[in-house]
Amino acid sequence: MDDPGNAPAGSAGGTRWNFNRVTALALAAIAAALLAAVPYQVAEQRTAFGRSLSGVNPALFPRLVLGAMLALAIAYFFLSPRLHEPNLFRRVAPRAFVDVAITFLCLLGYAVALPELGFVVSGAVLMVVLTLLYGNRNHFLTVATAVLAPTAIYFGFTRLLRVSLPEFPFF
């Protein structure tokens, strides 16, 4: 049975406000709100003798990502009337919504643990929990990835890009 809210624009019962358009508008609102919150969520640069210790402003990457998200959401909004796709959320298994909720809670726990445990430890714990949740049973690969990926990202950002990240708690 067809959903009248997803009918093509211009057809009988169709509307220009389809599922894609509403999604684009919601994504644009989220991106704009997060972009406005960046100055309040990103720590100030460390300074020594009045000079910045990092070569890149810590707010640069969040602003780039959220600016790109906002631009893509706006483009999606204007392209969405031409998209004629049904809303498939009604067909998604309930387990998928549980997985999304658990992932959200894990990310929330990661954000809380980040200042206390540091980037590498909290990232490794998050990776182990999520890979086990989603069914990876190769424990060697899980541990290797959970240790090596956050460590490589940490040293890449702190040493190469000179961006400060929450440090290891042990040194």
Image (cartoon, rainbow, N blue to C red):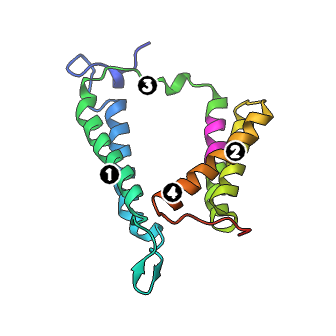
Name the residue: 37% across, 20% down.
Answer: 85
Lateral position of residue 77 relative to residue 108, left or right: left
- In the picture, the disc for residue 67 is 1
Lateral position of residue 29 relative to residue 121, left or right: left
Q: Look at label 1 and name its amino acid.
A: Gly
Q: Is the magenta stretch mostly helix, strand or loop?
A: helix
- In the picture, the disc for residue 146 is 2
Q: Nearer the viewer, residue 18 or 122?
A: 122
Q: Give the position of the N terminus as an image quadrant.
A: top left
Which element is circle 3 on? loop
Name the residue: 24% across, 30% down.
Answer: 79
Residue 100 is a magenta residue: yes
Which picture quadrant has residue 98?
top right
Pick whichever of labels 1 and 4 is earlier in the sequence: 1
Q: Nearer the viewer, mark 1 or mark 4?
A: 4
Q: Look at label 3 and name its amino acid.
A: Asn
- In the picture, the disc for residue 87 is 3
Alpha-carbon span between mark 2 and mark 3:
36 Å
Instruction: Please tell me whether residue 113 is drawn above or below residue 45 in the rendered image.
Output: above
Magenta residues span 97-105
